[in-house]
Image (tube, rainbow, N blue to C red):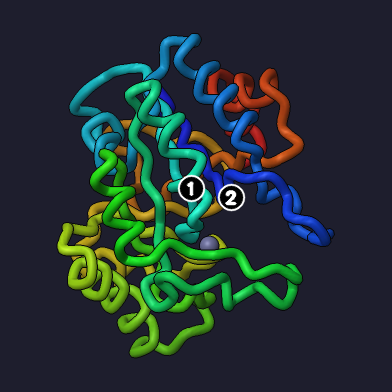
Amino acid sequence: MKIPILMYHNIAEVPEGINVYRSLYVSPAAFARQMALLRMLGYRGVSMSDAMVYLQGGKEGKIVVITLDDGYVDNLEWAMETLRRYGFTATCYAVSGYLGQYNAWDDEKLGVRKPLMSAEELRAWHAGGMEVGAHSRTHVRLSQCSDQQQREEIHGCKAELEDRLGIGVTQFCYPYGDYDERAVHATREAGYAAATTTDRGRATVGSSTDLWRLPRIQVARRHLLPQVAAKVLTRYEDKRA
Ligand SMILES: [Zn+2]
């Protein structure tokens, strides 16, 4: 038994003038078609917290986990309505040091400043039935941080989000999919329930699953519906892990 954890970033049309990393954009229409497809195939899209009981083998069902990285405003603008239409939930991983700001960690490389949700917008996301997860304080490469910096980025993000949003934050996602043993340890110690990576594949279910190194499946701009279906339903991604 395998559970696919989908990874998205921006749900929006590609802005004018952006020539690199266009793949991170999935159009609102494509996202809506993908959610409709999942529904048609009998799957329910769920957040990481809603998926925990399935990942741990306590419950069986056709679920697909939906995650969105970084906390872009477009998730609230375009993804939430579609998710709600199908009764789906999703986890958006926010960068706590940049709430209401922009992607300061890669805006120069991308040539575009992408607005990030403010605390108020994240509360609206949560009030809509969605989950807010943590994605570090400043979107660092954790393996390059000192132990002390790792603590600040991992523990600090949870504390900051919980304090500013007034909600519990129990899911973590390693920025750039970059982690080492220390980061895994710090994430467990900080009180998170699980953490996702950018390692490819579908998650294993039951006692053999590693909740601190969960693999994901990227859905990018170029992916057509049949590919999304193959990624979810078949061993297509597992073979590439
Ligand atoms: Zn990120």
The residue lying at 32 percent from left, 42 percent from top is 48
The amino acid type found where label 2 is placed reads Asn
The residue lying at 31 percent from left, 54 percent from top is 132
The amino acid type found where label 1 is placed reads Asn
The residue lying at 46 percent from left, 70 percent from top is 180
Label 2: how many residues lie within 10 Å, few (<14), some (14-19) or many (20+)?
Answer: many
Residue under pointer 2 = 10
Left or right: 217 as drawn, with respect to 52: right
Q: Are marks 1 and 2 in contact (CB under 8 Å)?
A: yes
The residue lying at 31 percent from left, 73 percent from top is 157
Q: Quadrant of the N terminus?
A: top left
Say whether disc 1 or disc 2 marks the residue closer to the N-terminus: 2
Q: Position of residue 122 (x, y in %)?
A: 33, 57
User: Does label 1 point to a residue whose CB lies under 8 Å from ligand 1?
Assistant: no
Quarter where residue 161 is shown: bottom left
Q: Secondary structure at mark 2?
A: strand
Q: Position of residue 58 (x, y in %)?
A: 18, 27
